[in-house]
Image (cartoon, helix red, strand yellow):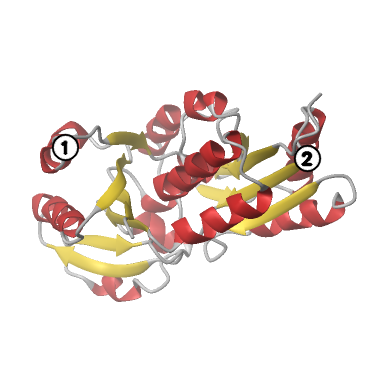
Amino acid sequence: MSSEPTVRIVTDSACDLSVEETTTNRIGVVPLTIRFGNDEYIDIEEISPKSFYEKMAATDILPATAAPSAGKFEQEFRRMAAEGATAVVCINLSLELSATGQAAQQAADSIGDDIDVRVVDSTTITAGLGTIVLRAAEAAASGATADEVVALVEQLRTRTRVFGALDTLENLKKGGRIGGAKALLGSVLNIKPILNLSSGAVSEAGKERTRKKALKWLCNELMSHDSVSDVTVIHGAADDVDDFHAQVSALFPDREIRINLVGPVIGAHAGPRLMAIAFTVDS
């Protein structure tokens, strides 16, 4: 076995990466738990995004989420060590929105004598987190040290943007994650709120009277920057996602625009038909 340091990446299921993406890039994913009333499901393992949205549409019970235990993270860190990792960088969804990163840090502290684990707050969610994780995995595979991977993540998180147009505020309101967007609660019915999740917390970015105008707002936000990369369309089982993807793709005819289905962790709070964009502002 090589004596060269081998860095592996771990994240949580709020990254909304596909199984193919995590498998190909040897990324470990620790799942959160989804609850519908008394029924609990382990994200990815026991409930898929497709079945989650079907279940949400079929019940009046609003889903809730719970962070993984420290033990789940410890299990994943030890698995990486057993596979030859000499260091692990664990990149989690925003600490402002979840205790997941705290659980990861507890696990890192408990096994610090066995393997070097660095826990980093991505300050973002869904495809914003997913993009950072993919970039970190690429760097690690190219031989970057743990220090270099952490520095990359800390730099990327300042340039990562996530904006979402909601179809309903009901999930966010009842889930208690509305944060700085509380003013939207008094909005006139049928207003389409637009949230900024770029700082790791939920804040109001705008509101439009129709979904069409809300999606146009997202496109305008993309084009307000001189140069962006890693543009991803994110949606909560939205029936108009193909049309929106075509709009975004037309803005960048020379590149492929990824589409990510928002998983249960974020979907539980954002509700159905979320349409969002994630991108990196180039320095």
**Nearer the observer, 187 or 130:** 130
Would residue 240 be seen by someone viewing this image from the given angle? no
Q: Where is residue 17 in the image (x, y as percent from the top left)?
A: 46, 35
Q: In this view, does 187 lie to the left or right of 117?
A: left
**Nearer the observer, 50 or 137:** 137
Q: Position of residue 102 (x, y in %)?
A: 69, 60
Q: Where is residue 13 in the image (x, y as percent from the top left)?
A: 55, 41
Picture quarter with the C terminus: bottom left
The earlier-in-sequence mark between 1 and 2 is 2
Residue with the mark numbered 2: 86
Give the structural element (helix, strand or loop) at label 2.
loop
| Other residues around mark 2 within 10 Å, as few (<14) / some (14–19) / many (≥20) | many
| Mark seen at residue 249 | 1
Q: Nearer the viewer, mark 1 or mark 2?
A: 2
- Count of labels in the image: 2
**Nearer the observer, 206 or 281:** 281
Res 184 → quadrant: bottom left
Residue type at mark 2: give it: Thr
Q: Where is residue 67 in the image (x, y as percent from the top left)?
A: 63, 51
| Other residues around mark 1 within 10 Å, as few (<14) / some (14–19) / many (≥20) | some
Whether 93 is drawn above or below 85: the answer is below
Give the structural element (helix, strand or loop) at label 1.
helix
Q: Could you give the CA–CA distance between mark 1 and mark 2, rounded to whole angstroms?
A: 40 Å
Q: Is residue 156 left or right of residue 240?
A: right
Picture quarter with the N terminus: top right
Res 223 → quadrant: bottom left
Q: Which residue lies furthest to the right in this view?
A: 113
Residue at image coords 81%, 33%: 3
Residue at image coords 21%, 67%: 206
Q: Is residue 221 left or right of residue 118?
A: left
